Image (cartoon, helix red, strand yellow):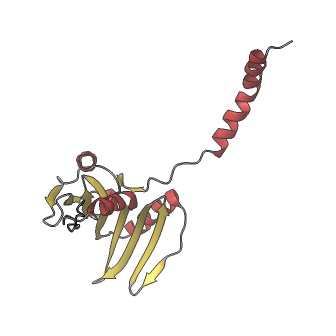
Amino acid sequence: MLTPLRALAVASLLLAPTLSGAKAATTAPDTAVLQFLGFRAGARLDELQLHLRGIGGSRMRCRQSRVDRRVNECRAVLNGQDLGGSVELWVSAMDSLAGVITLSGVVAPGQLERWRETLEGSYGRVGARVQGTQRMLQWVRRGRMIRLTWRLERGEKVASVSLVDGHVLDGWGRSGSVSAKPAPAQPTSRAR
C-alpha cells in the first residue's frame, strides 16, 4: 500500500515527461519586448550606449530638456552594411529610460525589404496603412509599439523604425501631472 507521500512522488514521476512536453510545445517566443537591430524601447540609456559601442555606432549625445529635467533627448549615428548606409538614432528618455526610439535614414536598394522581412519574421504580417505618400506597418504588444514607416523623398526611399514603450510614457505622464502650485488655503473654523 502506498502512503500519500509515495503516491504523490510516483504520480509526479509519471506525469513529469507529459508536463514538460506540454510546456515545451506551448511555449512561444516572447514578442512583448519589441526590438529592432538590438534596440528596444524601455532600455536604460547606459544600455543603449553600450549597444551602440558594440555595433560601431557613434557616441550618443544627450541634452536635458529645459522644460522637464527628467527628459533627455539623445542622438547618435549608426553606419554599417547591414543598415544599408547611415542611420540616425533619436532617443527620448524619461528618467534615463527610453520612452521613444527612432532609427531613420535614406535606405539602400533592398534595405527596406530586409527591414520589413525582419520585423514580419519576428512579429507577424500586418497590413500596410497608407497616408498620402507614406506607408506604415505597426505592431503593438502589451503597451509597447514598433512602427516601420517609409516614403519616397526626392527619388530616394526614406525609412524609419520607431519603438515606443507606453509604460515609460505613462509613468512619466503620471508623475508629471502633479501640480507644483500649492493648494488654495481653506478657511479655518474657530471653536467657540
Q: How many marks?
A: 0
Residue at 38 percent of width and 85 percent of height: 133
In the image, taking residue 175 as reference, residue 62 lies left or right, namely left
Q: Nearer the viewer, residue 191 or 164?
A: 191
Which residue is at the far front? 192
Seen in the picture, residue 44 relative to 131 is either above or below; the reply is above
Q: Nearer the viewer, residue 179 or 39?
A: 179
Residue 48 can be seen, yes or no: yes
Residue 84 can be seen, yes or no: no
Task: Indicate the quadrant containing the C terminus: top left, top right, bottom left or bottom right.
Answer: bottom left
Expressed as whole percent of the image width and height from the top left, the position of residue 144 reads 43, 60
Q: Nearer the viewer, residue 153 or 170?
A: 170
Task: Indicate the quadrant containing the N terminus: top left, top right, bottom left or bottom right.
Answer: top right
Which residue is at the far top? 1
Residue at 43 percent of width and 75 percent of height: 136
Residue at 61 percent of width and 44 percent of height: 27
Expressed as whole percent of the image width and height from the top left, the position of residue 6 reads 76, 15
Seen in the picture, residue 55 relative to 128 is either above or below; the reply is above
Seen in the picture, residue 128 relative to 179 is either above or below; the reply is below
Residue at 75 percent of width and 29 percent of height: 15
**Residue 101 is drawn in which quadrant?**
bottom left
Expressed as whole percent of the image width and height from the top left, the position of residue 72 reads 19, 59
Which residue is at the far bottom? 132
**Residue 25 is drawn in which quadrant?**
top right
**Residue 74 is drawn in which quadrant?**
bottom left
Expressed as whole percent of the image width and height from the top left, the position of residue 143 reads 45, 60
